[in-house]
Image (cartoon, coloured by chain):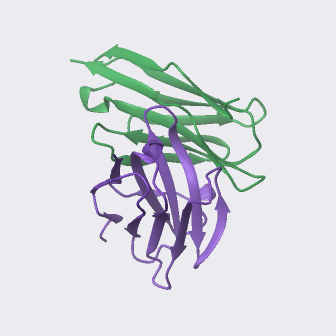
Chain colours: A green, B purple
Amino acid sequence: KNEVEQSPQNLTAQEGEFITINCSYSVGISALHWLQQHPGGGIVSLFMLSSGKKKHGRLIATINIQEKHSSLHITASHPRDSAVYICAVGSNTGNQFYFGTGTSLTVIP
Amino acid sequence: KAGVTQTPRYLIKTRGQQVTLSCSPISGHRSVSWYQQTPGQGLQFLFEYFSETQRNKGNFPGRFSGRQFSNSRSEMNVSTLELGDSALYLCASSLARGRTDTQYFGPGTRLTVL
């Protein structure tokens, strides 16, 4: 059983499209993290949130604690957004950190 | 500020050997977390150190261990290497505990076990 589920697994979009990646989790959490991993392995933390909504440039992350669901939106997608996006949660019991399997995004010019 | 550094970047070992990986966090960060990434299992949490103490541990056998020094630098050790230990090992540092703080990841150490 996966504590964190992401969808879709793969996503191809045309440049300029609005993109949504979804994350559902089954454990109680302290915080939810959205990470970006480019080819070659480097990981960057995009957002950490425990409630509501955060925005950074063209990226928006939302979380619904009651529904145990989060979404990552990319507005006006660009080829440089092509990467794997990973949802991770820090549980509030057992001090564990769980990861989704990632969403591979390809943005075509 | 310099980012998180990991050494070595690449490592090749044979089964049965042991390996030590090093992670230097961003200056001032007190938490260092370690993760394993494989194509089959994805990212998995190994353990977190905060103020020289292991604060939590993922579901890995005792062959995986670590420590943190007074300057927050951390090492991870894997003994009696198995083929399945081949992976990218990432460390991340944060000011506060990693579950509730933004983590800054290093470039990783790619370990190949032959």
Q: Position of residue A70 (x, y in %)?
A: 62, 32
Occupied quadrant, residue A2: top right
Question: For the point 50% across and 52% down, which residue is it?
Answer: B35
Q: Is residue A35 above or below residue A84?
A: below
Question: For the point 52% across and 61% down, which residue is it?
Answer: B33
Left or right: where B53 falls relative to B39: right
Residue B14 visible, this angle? yes
Image quadrant occupied by the C terminus of chain A? top left
Residue A75 visible, this angle? no
Question: For the point 33% across and 63% down, which residue is it?
Answer: B6
Q: Position of residue B74 (x, y in %)?
A: 46, 72
Q: Is residue B38 above or below residue B80?
A: above
Q: Position of residue A58 (x, y in %)?
A: 39, 34
Comparing A1 with A4, the one in front is A1
Image quadrant occupied by the N terminus of chain A? top right
Give the residue furthest to the bottom. Answer: B70
Give the residue furthest to the left. Answer: A109
Comparing A49 with B79, the one in front is B79
Left or right: where B110 falls relative to B89: left
Q: Position of residue B86 (x, y in %)?
A: 40, 45
Comparing B84 with A86, the one in front is B84
Comparing B4 with B110, the one in front is B110
Total marks shown come to 0
Question: For the point 36% across and 64% down, which residue is it?
Answer: B4
